[in-house]
Each structure stands twice: as C-alpha cells, then as structure tokens.
Image: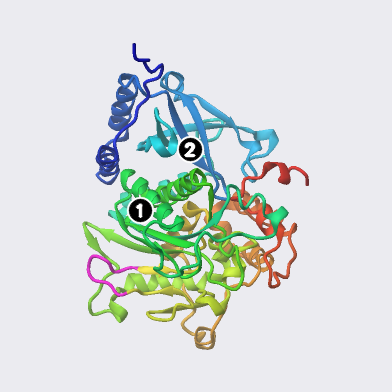
Amino acid sequence: MEPTSLRSFLEIPYDQLEEMNLAAKQQRIDRVDPAKVKAERVKYLAGEKRIKAVTVCFSDLEGRLHMLDYDKKFLLKSYDNLTFDGSSIRGFSQQSESDLRLGVDWPATYWLPSDVFGPGKVLVFGEVLDREGKAYAGDMRGVLKQYLAKLFAKDGSVCYAANEIEGFLFKGRDAERHFHETGKFEYVSTGGYYHSLPTDPLRNFIDAAAEAQRAMGFENEKDHPEVAPSQFEMNFSYAEALIAADQFQLYKLLCRQIAQRMDMTASFLPKPVTGINGSGAHTNISVGRKGKNVFYDKAGQDGVSKLAWEFIDRILNAGSDLCLILNPSVNAYRRLDPHFEAPNQIKVSAIDRGAMIRIPLGNERSARIEVRSVGPDTNIYQTLYALFRTGFEGAGADPKDEAKRARTRFLPDNIQDAVRLFKQSKWMVELFGESVHGKFAEVKMGAAERCPKLLGTTVKAGEVQFHHEVTNQYLWNRF
C-alpha cells in the first residue's frame, strides 16, 4: 500500500503563477476599487483549502523588509485588527508609543514560487497605522502611496519608475554576518561584465532568480553578470511607482532567499569590496498623463520636455540634502568614488556616467531621467517619494547664480557630512515632517558613530555588521 501525504499545501506551476500575478498587477494599474479586490481576495483565501498562511510584509524607516506570517483562518477573522510592537523596530516608534496597527493592502497580493518561499503561502503588502488607525508617518510606503494618489486625483498624473539593482554573490551563507570574523568576502565568479558560463554558480543563481521574478509578474527584460567579479544585475519593466517599489523589495528578498538555498549570499552592500566597481540602483523616473509620457519632447534639449528639465533642476538643487536618502549607509560613501564610474557629481549629462543624473536615449514611450546616485540599500519608498515630490515642488537653482551653476559640485563623501546636510535642510523637514526627519537622522547617526569617519582603503567590520540590511540583532544589542 502506497503511503499518502499528510500535507496538501498549495504549489502553483511557474507559468500559472505568472498569469495570476500579472492579473493582480493589472488590477492595480486599472485602479480597480480596493473594496472589490478585497472581497475577491477574501473569497479566494476562504475557498482555497491548500493555503496555510498569509505573509504580510512592511518596510521600516530604513527600508528593511519585515514579514509576519498569519495563519490563514486567523487572518480572515482578524485582518481589521492586526497589531505589532513598533518599538522593537529601530527608528520606528518609541517604547511609550509601541503599539502599531497593520492594515492589508489587498491589491498588492503576490502568489509565491513554492520552491523558493515554501508551499501554501501567499504574500501581501501591509500598511502601517497608528493606534487610532490613521496612516503612520514613518511608513514610507504609505507616504508614497498617499502622495501618488493625490497627484492622480489632481490632474491624472501617474509616476513611473524602474530600478537597475546591482548586487554581489558571495560564497557561503550569511557571509555579511560573519564578516567581522573573516574580514573578507569570497567571489563565486571572477568573470566580469557579461562573462559567465551557462552553468557556473553566478549564472545558475541569475537564472533561478530571473525565473522566480518572471513568475511573480515582474515582466523581465534582461539579466547579466555586471562589471565587478561576482556582481549581477537583473532588469524588469517600468511600472507605476508603488508597484516598482514593491518589486524592488521583493527582488532583494528573493535574491537573498535563492542565494541562501545555493549556500551563497546575495549582498546589496553598495561597496563590499574595495578596488572594484560598487553596486548601484540607478533609478529611472518619468510622469504620464492620459497615456502620454510628459517627459518626452522630440524638439526639447536631449529629447526631454520642459517638465523633465524642471525635475532635473530641482533634484540637482537639492542634491546634497537628498544624498542621505539615496545613500543611507556608511558603506554607501565608498561607492561614490570617481575612479569607478561613480555618480558623485551634482550635474546632469546625457553621456557622463559620473553625473548624478543622466538623460538616456529615449523615444515617446521610454523618455525618462536616470538618477544614478541611488544605492541598492536605500529605502526605495522614501527615495521615490523624495524624488517625485522634489521634482514637482522643490526649489530650482537661482538663475542669477550662474557661478554656482557653472562650477562642478560633489556629493558628500562620508555619511557624517550627509547627515549634517540632511539635518540642516528645511526642504527635508517639509518633506518628512519634524518627527520622521529627526528619527531618520538619529538612526543613521547611530550607525555612523559605530564606524570610523575616514573610510580608508579597506572595508571595516563595523560598516558591514551595523549596516541596516544585515540582520544581526545579537551584535546590535551588544551596544
């Protein structure tokens, strides 16, 4: 007599997963009434007996992704009364105001590849709320979502984004956590740009990650080894800004998960190894209205419109103030090194890759601006909110100050200076509010003070073990 399985949890083939996730994505694009989507999801969860849990995820102020698994039956009864302890999350809330609520953003549901995340689960993004059920000011995803909705309600403006997220693949699990013991990272490949044999460890990782992304509805474009040894980049299509930001977070999550399954580590430290190129997350943005790309102008300078040039001017004018948002870690300032194609100059160029903003070649569909100084460890919700709001509402450079506009200005080369400029900026206070502005500066300074101010020529243990994306609660709690 053949043994029967005691468990029957949901496992969906990749091609079917892709169809389901693309359909859910289209509902977000079509702005289907969230109440209708909620009713669909609740009915689906109640009827699908093979689902055991729902993963509700949210990002903290620094951009770390947090996940809570709720038993499906419990969630269906309690989704309007989910709570968690915000004081246990660095930079989120004080002990005296620790209780926070977690809403469910039902349209932002993803069906997961069971071989990567385990069978019987679906994932949905959460919305952090305060005790009264109002949007929590420190939840940058919620802040971005509200701002995008406001723009659309005003004049139909739709913000688009695409990120080119680079990372490194190193030998061994949890290589970052063990860096303070080993003092080094080991490459899995030394091939370099585009060079990777079809079945070497780097290519196997890229293939597996690309397959998972495709199944999750990312709409892949291209993937390849990057310039530095053991470095990778996987590109997926332009999307509305909130969808793009959610995919940014899921991209890093699935890369880490797949690497770990292969006994390797996917690292998004901006510059984990000196002497080679670092990793960036070049952020392409544009704005559409009534199906038209309003950043495009065939007759405009470099093929972009007056609005696009206003965006560029305002972002560059706030470049130093924005630097901490785009580059929020000690290690990020190693990447802003002019010897490695680093975008550390506060200027715009169609060809110079050392410029903070580049204008890629484009047509009516693809015209955009590329903010090159963004690091892969940024809080992408905070970054997109800051870039779009600065582009629409920030102050441009004074036309009378030609001398200032003509000379080459540089971004800060260390986090201490970036924190100082951020703290002094009235525009940053206006963007985030005094409380969030102060909390973000405080938590960034907390990491900075655990590391030498002068970066030097070798990566220090402190900038890795106290990096906000390196989950080593034990080491943090020793201070």
Viewer-nearest of labels 1 and 2? Answer: 2
Give the overall secondary structure of the magenta segment.
loop
Amino acid bearing label 2: Cys
Q: Nearer the viewer, residue 122 or 441?
A: 122
In the picture, measured across the screen, residue 350 lies left or right of residue 167, that is: left
Q: Is residue 236 left or right of residue 191?
A: left
Q: Which residue is mark 2?
A: 57
Q: Residues within 10 Å of mark 2 (few under 14, many from 20)?
A: some
Specify the farthest residue to the top. 1
Q: How many marks?
A: 2
Q: Which residues are magenta?
A: 361-368
Kindly identify the residue that appears in the image at 53 percent across and 71 percent down. Answer: 277
- Residue type highlighted by circle 1: Leu
- Please indicate, yes or no, whether residue 349 appears anywhere in the rendered image: yes
Q: Is residue 218 left or right of residue 86?
A: left
Label for residue 151? 1
User: Can residue 466 be spotted in the picture?
Assistant: no
**Residue 459 vertical position relative to residue 299 in the rendered view, above or below:** above
